[in-house]
Amino acid sequence: MAIGGPNTYVLAVSGGVDSVVLLDVMSKLPNTNLVVAHFDHGIRDDSAEDARFVEGLARRYGAEFETKREELGPRASEDLARKRRYEFLRDVARRHQGHLVTAHHADDVAETVAINLTRGTGWRGLAAMHSDVLRPLTGHTKQQLLLYALRHQLEWHQDSTNSSDAYLRNRMRRKMSKLPRPIQDEVGELRRKQIALKQQIEAEVRQLIGDGPTYERYFFIHAPSFAALECLRVATDGKLTRPQLERALLAVKTAKPQATYQAGLGTELRFASRQFRVELLK
């Protein structure tokens, strides 16, 4: 049964130390309804044990428990596993009308920024993990979370895949751990500055194009491509990849009146002669 309300928080709990600390910290906040959400990828043979462990945690803290298992298999990519996990988590948050909360910490942020840089990210890749998801632990390091868990005698499960070289994040984690702490902290500070810049840019874009969902084609046709793409990104709620945005911009410039264009990820553009409307489908 969905509980709902502004004080409802859906916690992504894997059973690892980070999410166990998150659950313990959130349980101490007054007047909160907690939903523990656990996604079992089916990648490891022993993953069902994690689900049972997390279910026991939920009972211990008096939280509602939501879980889902999929058989992605040991060859599943990191990106696929992440995508399927967030689809589940967002669905749970939507049904419970709650805020989605994850246990990402400062080391995770630095690793994600580093991964984005190795992939040739644009400036937005430096504003990693900035979305509607709440991440209250990003100001704390992994070591601080471990110390908290030990001090409060918390129990957790260690994911055996964390030591596997098959995953890019694990390889990056080992590289980042060799950097002096001040340099890792600088990455976190850079991220915070980029997030502030991103928010400022989005506010400026809204002043240019309006709040939508209907926009003037003339502006997008005659603006410089880099500016038009940035504006279209905001108009489509940041859902589209760069290649999808480029194809969508071409449609804005060339589509005939009454045409529709499926931009991807549930985003549809509907065209009139001088305007187009963005429909974000669910």
Image: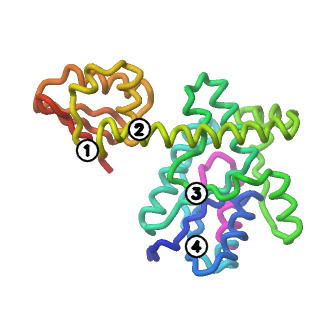
* Residue 204: assigned label: 2
Residue under label 1: 213
Mark 2 and mark 1: Cα distance apart in space: 17 Å
**Quick one: label 3 or label 2, which is nearer the N terminus?**
3
Mark 3 and mark 2: Cα distance apart in space: 24 Å
Q: Are marks 3 and 2 in contact (CB under 8 Å)?
A: no
Q: Is residue 278 magenta?
A: no
Mark 4 and mark 2: Cα distance apart in space: 36 Å
Instruction: Indicate the amino acid at tag 3.
Output: Leu
Instruction: Indicate the amino acid at tag 1.
Output: Pro
Give the secondary structure at mark 3.
loop
Q: How many marks?
A: 4
* Residue 134: assigned label: 3
Q: Are marks 2 and 1 in contact (CB under 8 Å)?
A: no
**Quick one: label 2 or label 1, which is nearer the N terminus?**
2
Q: Residue at x 52, y 38 (%)?
A: 198
Residues rendered magenta in the picture: 39-56
* Residue 24: assigned label: none
Between marks 3 and 1 in the image, the one whose residue lies nearer the viewer: 1
171 with respect to 228 (left or right) = right
Nearest the viewer among 162 and 110 is 110
Query: Local crowd at mark 3 within 10 Å, few (<14), some, or many (≥20)?
Result: some
Instruction: Indicate the amino acid at tag 4.
Output: Leu
Nearest the viewer among 136 and 72 is 136
Residue under label 4: 34
